[in-house]
Amino acid sequence: MNLDAELGALAAQEDLPAGLVWRLLRHPQARRSAALLRRDLTPKLMEEIIRLGSARSLAANSSVPARVRARLAEHPQPSVRAAVAASVTDEPPGLLARLADDQDPLVRGFLAMNEHLPPELLAALAADSEPSVRSSVIENWKDAPEPVRRALLTDPDPHIRRSAASAYSPPTDLVPVLLADPETRASTVQYVDPSPQLAADPDPGVRAAVAAHPNLPGELRNVLIADADVGVRNTIAARPDIPSALRESLVATLATDDPVAEWIMSFQRSTHTSPPPAPAPPMLTRGQAEDLLARAGL
């Protein structure tokens, strides 16, 4: 661990004497770590963090008193207001509504992540004029009511329609519409019976969706085994109902020199390996902490 990382870890250590925290505030990375992670920040420490330019990290700390986060919700920098918006409660009352009307879409997009947001404000954000805000609603409101889902599934922005189709089950009457839309067809395949037409679709994403369909008939599986797209063949190889000998022969056709592509494909087949988690940084004694601060000139 390099010196900056050691100081950042020390700044988040529990039961650290206040005098050491004050000294750590002089180091940018340690200051951001303390602002974001410490639960024992005093009013004076918070004021110093703001003065030194780490208001954004402080705003994202859910342990900071509501009055301080409400103050930061008025900060001139949108990134600070956005950090508040992501998790603040409605204290004082009306704070969430004010953030929903913020002029910067970054703030409104982060507000859509807030688990304290009432449905009426989420619905307002789902109709926001900025696509990035509507996209954030899709990512974070998985149980949106049907009127909201319907509006997002038929949104004029193709990226929004594609995201909504991946996130939501469509109303039955919309399935033909979504299946006819190139942006939503692949995600809608799961709601219809596989067909030779879909298995021959020019979009490999549609063919892969057919390959993953739980009711894929054997004759279409045999067609897709020989598909020109490696992703489609990998999807067939990932099926739990495919004979092991056939899976092995398919995997042999998936060789690639791209390690990222190889990892993605092995992840789909559940054969990937993840690196072990990094060990937690050691707790430092007062003497060790003093030595570290001395090395850093703090």
Image: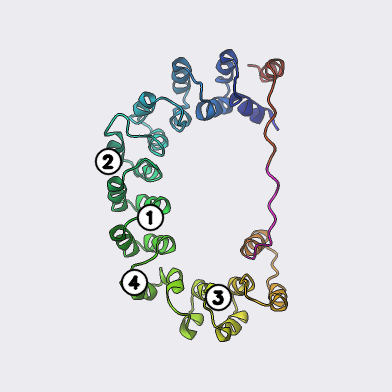
For mark 1, does the 10 Å Cα neighbourhood hold few (<14), some (14 to 19), or many (20 or more) residues?
few
Q: CA distance from mark 4 to mark 2?
A: 34 Å
Can I make out residue 165 in this image?
A: yes
Q: Secondary structure at mark 3?
A: helix
Q: Residue 121 is drawn in which quadrant?
A: top left
Give the residue number, with chain letter if any, for mark 3.
211
Give the residue number, with chain letter if any, for mark 4.
172
Mark 1 touches mark 3? (CB < 8 Å): no
Q: Is residue 168 above or below residue 59?
A: below
Which label sits on residue 101?
A: 2
Marks 1, 2: nearer the viewer: 1
Identified by mark 1, the residue type is Asp
Mark 1 and mark 4 lie on one chain; the one further toward the N terminus is 1
For mark 4, does the 10 Å Cα neighbourhood hold few (<14), some (14 to 19), or many (20 or more) residues?
few
Q: CA distance from mark 1 to mark 2?
A: 23 Å
Identified by mark 2, the residue type is Asp
Q: Where residue 185 sits: x, y (%)? A: 42, 72
Q: CA distance from mark 1 to mark 3?
A: 27 Å
Question: What residue is at 58 percent from the left and 27 percent from the top?
Answer: 12
Marks 4, 2: nearer the viewer: 4
Mark 1 and mark 2 lie on one chain; the one further toward the N terminus is 2
